[in-house]
Amino acid sequence: MKQTGDMARQSAQQSELPSALRAAVAYLLSHQAADGHWQDYRLPVGRSTAWVTAYVGVALAESDHSEAVRRSAGAAADWLEQHRPTPQGWGYNDHTGPDADSSAFALTLLRLAGKTPLPSDLAWLRQRWHRNGGFATYARDDAWGAPHNDVTPAAFLALAPADQIALRDDVLEVLARERCKDGTWPSYWWRTCHYATWWSLRLLRALGVPQKGRLPVVGMDEQHAIHGAFDLALVTGIASLQQARPGLISGLASELLALQQQDGAWAGSMNLRVTDPSCHQPWSGDVACGRLYADEDHLVTTATALRVLAEIAKMAEITVVMEVKQ
C-alpha cells in the first residue's frame, strides 16, 4: 500500500512540477531590474547586488533554457562585467570588496551566458585557496580569511579547468576531513549546515564521487533544523544527491511545493549569518557568532528551491525515458 501511495504522489508531483517551476522563473524574472541586476537582503553595508545577481542568474540559467531566461542571464552577466568597483573579483555589493563566493557565482554565470572570464579574475579566485584547507571568502587575516565549507565547492567549480585538475585530490581530502560524523558539513555564513552540505555533495558528484545510503540530517538544534523554505529546499536537494528512496524525495518535494506562494516565490527567512570575524566556528554555539538576516525579496530562497526542484524534475524525466526504453 505504501508503495502505491508513493507512486501516486510521484505521479501527481510530476504533473505539478512544470507549473511550479514556470511560476518560480516568472517571479525571479519579474524582480530583475531593467539594467540586468537583482538585489536582496538588507545588511548594515547595504543591499546585496553583485552576489545576489550572480546567484540568481546561475540558478535560472541552470534550471531553465527558455529564450527569456537566456536573455535574462545575458543581461545579468553584462551587468556584472560593467559594474567592477575592484580590478578583480566581485563582492556582496560595491562597498564590501571582492569575495570568493560572489566571484565564483559571477564567473559561473559569465560562462553560462557564453562569455569568457578574464584570466585575472580566475587567478584572483585561485589565490583564495588555502593549501589542504579549502577556499577562504576574503583575503584577510581573521576568520573571514580562513577556509569555509560553504564557499569551497562553488569556488572550486568556478576555477579554470587546469586549476581544477591540479587541486582535485586536495579538495577531496578537504571534503573528507571537514565532514562531520553525521555526514554533514558545517556552514560559516549560513544558519544551518544544510547549505554547505548540499554544495559539498554537488561537488562530490561533479568529481565523480556520488553518495548513496545516507539520509538528510535534520534535528531540533539550530544548525540541523529546518527554519523555512530555504532549509527545506536544501534538505530536499540533499536527499536527491544522496539517492534516498524515491518516496522520501517525493515527500520532501511535495512539502516544498506546498510552501510556494501564489506569486511563484518561496518566502525568505533568517538564513544568512554575518558571522563575527573573530569567530571561526559559529556552529559550536559557545561564542557570539553574529547576526542573522533574511532575503526580504525572497530571491535566494526562490532561486534555491528552483534549482532543487528543476533537478528533481530532470531526474524524473530521465527515469521515465529509461523505463520506456526497458
Image (spheres, rainbow, N blue to C red):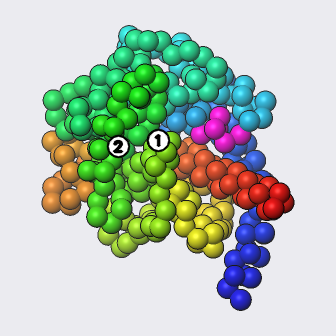
Q: Is residue 305 highlighted in magenta?
A: no
Disc 2 marks which residue?
A: 172
The image quadrant of residue 254 is bottom right
Q: Which residues are magenta?
A: 59-64
In the picture, measured across the screen, residue 85 lies left or right of residue 308, that is left
Q: Does the CB distance between marks 1 and 2 fall below 8 Å?
A: yes
Task: Kindly identify the residue that appears in the image at 46 percent across and 29 percent down.
Answer: 158
On the image, the x and y values in percent for residue 11 come to 78, 69
Where residue 308 is drawn, which disc sits there?
none
Of all residues shown, which one is farthest toward the bottom? 1
Secondary structure beneath label 1: loop
In the rendering, at what x and y percent does residue 294 appear?
A: 44, 49
* Secondary structure of residue under mark 2: helix
- The residue that appears at 43% across and 26% down in the rendered structure is 159
Task: Tell me the residue at 72%/25% (across/down).
Answer: 71
Q: Quadrant of residue 155?
A: top left
Q: In terms of depth relative to the viewer, which is nearer, 238 or 270?
A: 238
Can residue 285 be seen here?
yes
Q: Residue at x 59, y 33 (%)?
A: 57
| Position of 137 relative to 89 (above/below) | below
Asked if the magenta segment contains residue 60, the reply would be yes
- Quadrant of the drawing holding the N terminus: bottom right
Q: Position of residue 217 (x, y in %)?
A: 41, 67
- Side (left or right) of 33 relative to 192: right
Q: Is residue 270 visible?
A: no
Q: Residues within 10 Å of mark 1 (few under 14, many from 20)?
A: some
Q: CA distance from mark 1 to mark 2?
A: 9 Å
Crowd class of label 2 (few under 14; some 14 to 19; many from 20; radius 10 Å):
some
Report which residue position mark 1 lands on.
207
Q: Amino acid at mark 2?
A: Leu
